[in-house]
Image (cartoon, rainbow, N blue to C red):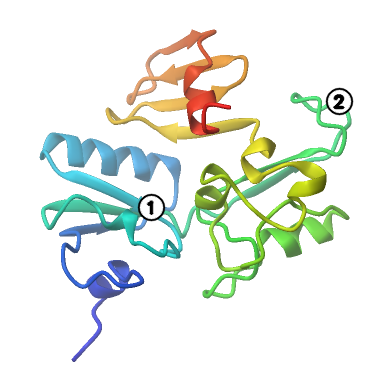
Amino acid sequence: DTLTPWHLGNLRNRLTDDMAYYVVIPRTAEDVVAAVQFAAQHNLGISVFSTGHEFNDRNGGPGNNTLLIRTTCLNEVTFDLREDNEFGAVDGVVRMGAGLTWGTSKFGQAGMHELAEEQERVVVSGHAGNVGVVGWSLGGGHGQLVGTYGMGVDQVVQVDLVGADGSIVVARQEGTAVTSADGSRTEESEDASLFWALRGGG
């Protein structure tokens, strides 16, 4: 048997059927927008994952006629270590792409532990380095430092995501901003319910 790029893109822990028909590996947020718009136009279900570390394969999607978005290449990192950063975080903040892992990835990319150490910082994370930052953070986020700093989800101050219509959504405690898929307009609201829902409602 030959492992094709399609099989590799669909690779999960245990899933052997219900594989996505389309696999998209975006390099930018605009690529994600285009993939979501394509799925909406063709009535395709969507599943999203980065590392595929999910033990129960809940990232498997709704069936064969689906589009899978793998965020592996969304790996940009931006540190803001100024004491007067926009979130008022004394020790600074970091913006992490959805494809990052806590340790060195299976593709050899430096993980958040190494990147934070270069900035003389420590990140709150779990013990498995190959876990993706998004799934861990929004899945609660248990780890060795939670007794001191709180769970992973407690560290989240903003989430940027792509809506079902391809819009760019920025959710934070102060409210939500939605930019249309074509970038022509942005609507802002003080409604922070999406932010709290992403953090588990707490």
Helix or strand or loop: what does disc 2 sit on? loop
Residue count near mark 2 (Cα–Cα under 10 Å), binned few <14, some 14–19, many ≥20: few
- Which residue is drawn at the image coordinates 13% and 35% (left, top)? 41
What is the spatial separation of the Cα atoms under label 1 and label 2, in whole angstroms?
A: 33 Å
Q: Which mark is residue 26?
A: 1
If the image is split into quadrants, where does the C terminus sit? top right
Tell me residue 198's x, y (percent).
Answer: 49, 32
- Viewer-nearest of labels 1 and 2? 2
- Which residue is drawn at the image coordinates 74% and 59% (left, top)? 115
| Depicted 134 relative to depicted 105: above or below | above
Tell me residue 46's x, y (percent).
Answer: 24, 46
| Depicted 55 relative to depicted 119: above or below | below
To which quarter of the image does residue 159 belong?
Answer: top right
Tell me the residue that label 2 is attached to. Answer: 84
Q: Amino acid at mark 1?
A: Pro
Helix or strand or loop: what does disc 1 sit on? loop
Tell me residue 150's x, y (percent).
Answer: 73, 41
Tell me residue 1's x, y (percent).
Answer: 18, 91
For this view, does 103 lie left or right of residue 178? Answer: right
User: Which residue occupies the extreme bottom position in the image?
Assistant: 1
> Front-most of 80 and 129?
129
> Front-most of 101 and 30?
101
* Nearest to N terminus: mark 1 or mark 2: 1
Q: Amino acid at mark 2?
A: Asp
- Which residue is drawn at the image coordinates 75% and 64% (left, top)? 114
For this view, does 17 lie left or right of residue 165? Answer: left
